Image (cartoon, helix red, strand yellow):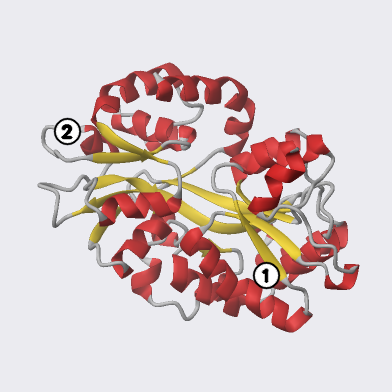
Amino acid sequence: ALAALLVPLGLIPTTTGAQDAPLTIATWGGAYTDALTEAYAEPFTAETGTPVQFVDAPGGFNAMLEAQVNAGNVTWDIVDVGEEDAVAMIDAGHLQPLPDDLKAELIEAVGEENVTDYGISFASYGSVIVCNAAAAEACPTNAAEFWDVENFPGRRAMYGDGWSENLMYALLADGVAKEDLYPLDIDRAFAKLDELKPHINVWWTTGDQSQQIFRDEEVVMGIMWDGRAHGLRDQGVDVQLSFEGSPISRDLLVVPADAPNAEAAWEFLRWYATHPEGGKIWIEQIGYGVANPDAYAEVAPEITADMGGSPDNMAKGVISDVEWARENRETVLPRWTEWLAS
């Protein structure tokens, strides 16, 4: 029955021989998948002969991988997942660590700060305050102003699955200094969120939706990923971005413990790390950061100005503490889910 459910989603692997078996990557969908295809998948296939196929699973990576593991039918080779969720996968035993020799190669290519025991940094981003200046009476530039609905009126949006970054923004709005955020004061954060909740008109759940609600002027301001915000300009929406206090996060490219084509997965990670030209295309297409610093060399300054991973914006933001999230996820996430539904 589970297999029947998974077939329409493209989760059942092909039955081709091992040498022709596709590499299956679970990722975020829409414009994100399009950019990943152009920047990395197509040139990787052209060079190695290994076909790449994508499964779009925004917001559902952990639950879907858990279902595959429980069914004894893991079909993903790489998961492009937020680091907090990757940590949860590690704790559940669902990922395999990088081979020692590959880890050393990746560190040599992109630096130790971009490599973990289980994966490599990909799509670094900031959750930023975004405002359509043409449609809003006034644009907020920090958390306190975003909470100030009287002086900064307008329909608002926040990320429905962004429990940790929303708690961070709430504490910043309540006057906590960036350097004093961690450990997060959970009760204080939820109390501050209670004040704003009646004024949040859309709790978006996918990157495409976050753009759609701005294009349709369903909202005029919100908190969204910087790459998606940058993409709005290409879609005709002249938005302003503020990185003040922005939580800075990253995805990791990781490999499930029972990935059917793990060898191709390791080769893709190696290829990604050593091909900065793909990173240039990726940055220009979607506006998220990559691990290889050489990718930034020829990117226009006006693009890096809108990226949470750029040095200037990193200094304005706050790097999310994934170890805190790891220790508190089991208690805080259910509370967030219940709060959001109430």
Q: What element carries label 1?
A: helix
Answer above or below: position of 110 versus 12: below
Residue located at (37% from left, 50% from top): 210
Residue type, mark 2 in image: Val
Element class at badge 2: loop
Q: Residue 149 carries which label?
A: 2
Q: Is residue 325 left or right of residue 191?
A: right
> Real-space Cα distance between discs 1 and 2?
44 Å
Residue 14, image x and y in percent? 80, 62
Front in this rendered view, residue 60 or 256: 60
Where is residue 227? Give x, y as percent: 42, 59
Specify the quadrant of the image occupied by residue 85: top right
In the image, is 26 to the left or to the right of 134? right
Residue at the (86%, 57%) spot, across then down: 100
The residue sitting at 78% across, 57% down in the picture is: 13
Residue density around tag 1, few if under 14, some if 14–19, many if 20 or more, within 10 Å = many
